[in-house]
């Protein structure tokens, strides 16, 4: 039995040695894997930082370009708006200078339209009732007077509904002829 016990002890010892060798090898392998993993992780961090810097540079350039485009567009819009407003003011001034009665009549018509569209309130009737009627009566008199003066001036100039209609027809005929001539001229040039 002692031989058997000795053999068992030898097997145990060999098994332990083998296990210890495996542990030592595994430890070395684990350490090797750790080093490789650490190196790859450091390399990945470095690549990520490089890519991050590139992306930030591109984003910064894109933001700068967008700001420039927005600024250019805004400046152009402001210039166009100013020019349009200037033209509108000039045209309005010309219209008022050429036919002030038309402007007055248009203003009165616009006021009448707003008055017709907006409902009258109780408070308005109580506060402005009598004054409103007086203003309304005065406005009717002004409109009637303007109408009479306008008719008198038109009569002095020889403008009747028939002569006015004839003048408009004549102008439209001349306009049509001018357009035809321009079209013919354009075809000849081609």
Image (tube, rainbow, N blue to C red):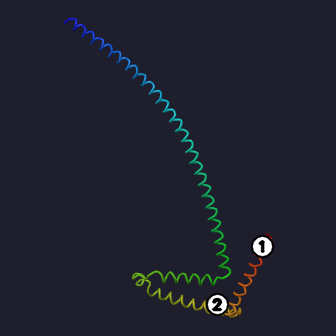
From what the image shows, is residue 157 above or below residue 190?
below
From what the image shows, is residue 99 above or below residue 145?
above
Q: Which residue is mark 1?
A: 187
Other-residue count near label 1 (Cα within 10 Å), few / some / many at <14 / 14–19 / ≥20? few
Q: Nearer the viewer, mark 2 or mark 1?
A: 1
Task: Report the front residue among 174 and 161.
Answer: 174
Asked which quadrant contains residue 179, the reply is bottom right
The residue shown at (55%, 84%) is 109
Quadrant in which the N terminus is drawn:
top left
The residue shown at (44%, 84%) is 128
Residue 119 position, x and y percent, is 44, 82
133 sits to left or right of 58: left
Is there CB contact under 8 Å for labels 2 and 1?
A: no
30 sits to left or right of 138: left
From what the image shows, is residue 158 above or below residue 20?
below
Which of the labelled discs sits on residue 59, or is there none? Answer: none
Q: Which residue is mark 2?
A: 150
In this view, the residue farthest toward the right is 188
Residue 50 position, x and y percent, is 53, 35
Lower sequence index among marks 2 and 1:
2
Asked which quadrant contains residue 77, the reply is bottom right
Q: Circle 2 sits in a helix, a strand or a loop, which is it?
A: helix
Task: Report the front residue among 37 and 104.
Answer: 37
Task: Report the front residue among 137 and 98.
Answer: 98
Residue 142 position, x and y percent, is 57, 89
Q: Circle 1 sits in a helix, a strand or a loop, which is it?
A: helix
In this view, the residue farthest toward the top is 2
Could you give the CA–CA distance between mark 2 and mark 1, rounded to whole angstroms?
Answer: 46 Å
The residue shown at (78%, 76%) is 184
17 sits to left or right of 163: left
92 sits to left or right of 45: right
From what the image shows, is residue 38 above or below residue 2?
below
């Amino acid at each position: 039995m002692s031989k058997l016990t000795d053999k068992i002890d030898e097997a145990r010892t060999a098994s332990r040695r083998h296990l210890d060798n495996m542990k030592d090898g595994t430890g070395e392998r684990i350490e090797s894997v750790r080093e490789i993993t650490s190196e790859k992780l450091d390399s990945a961090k470095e690549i990520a930082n490089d890519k991050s810097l590139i992306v930030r540079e591109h984003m910064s350039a894109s933001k700068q370009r967008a700001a420039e485009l927005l600024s250019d567009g805004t400046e152009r819009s402001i210039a166009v708006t100013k020019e349009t407003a200037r033209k509108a003011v000039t045209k309005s001034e010309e219209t008022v200078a050429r036919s002030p009665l038309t402007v007055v009549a248009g203003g009165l018509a616009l006021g009448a339209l707003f008055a017709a569209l907006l409902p009258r309130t109780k408070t308005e009737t109580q506060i402005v009732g009598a004054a409103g009627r007086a203003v309304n009566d005065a406005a009717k008199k002004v409109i009637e007077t303007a109408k009479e003066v306008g008719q008198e001036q038109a009569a002095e100039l020889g403008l009747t509904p028939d002569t006015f209609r004839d003048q408009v027809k004549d102008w439209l005929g001349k306009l049509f002829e001018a357009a035809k001539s321009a079209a013919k001229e354009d075809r000849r040039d081609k």
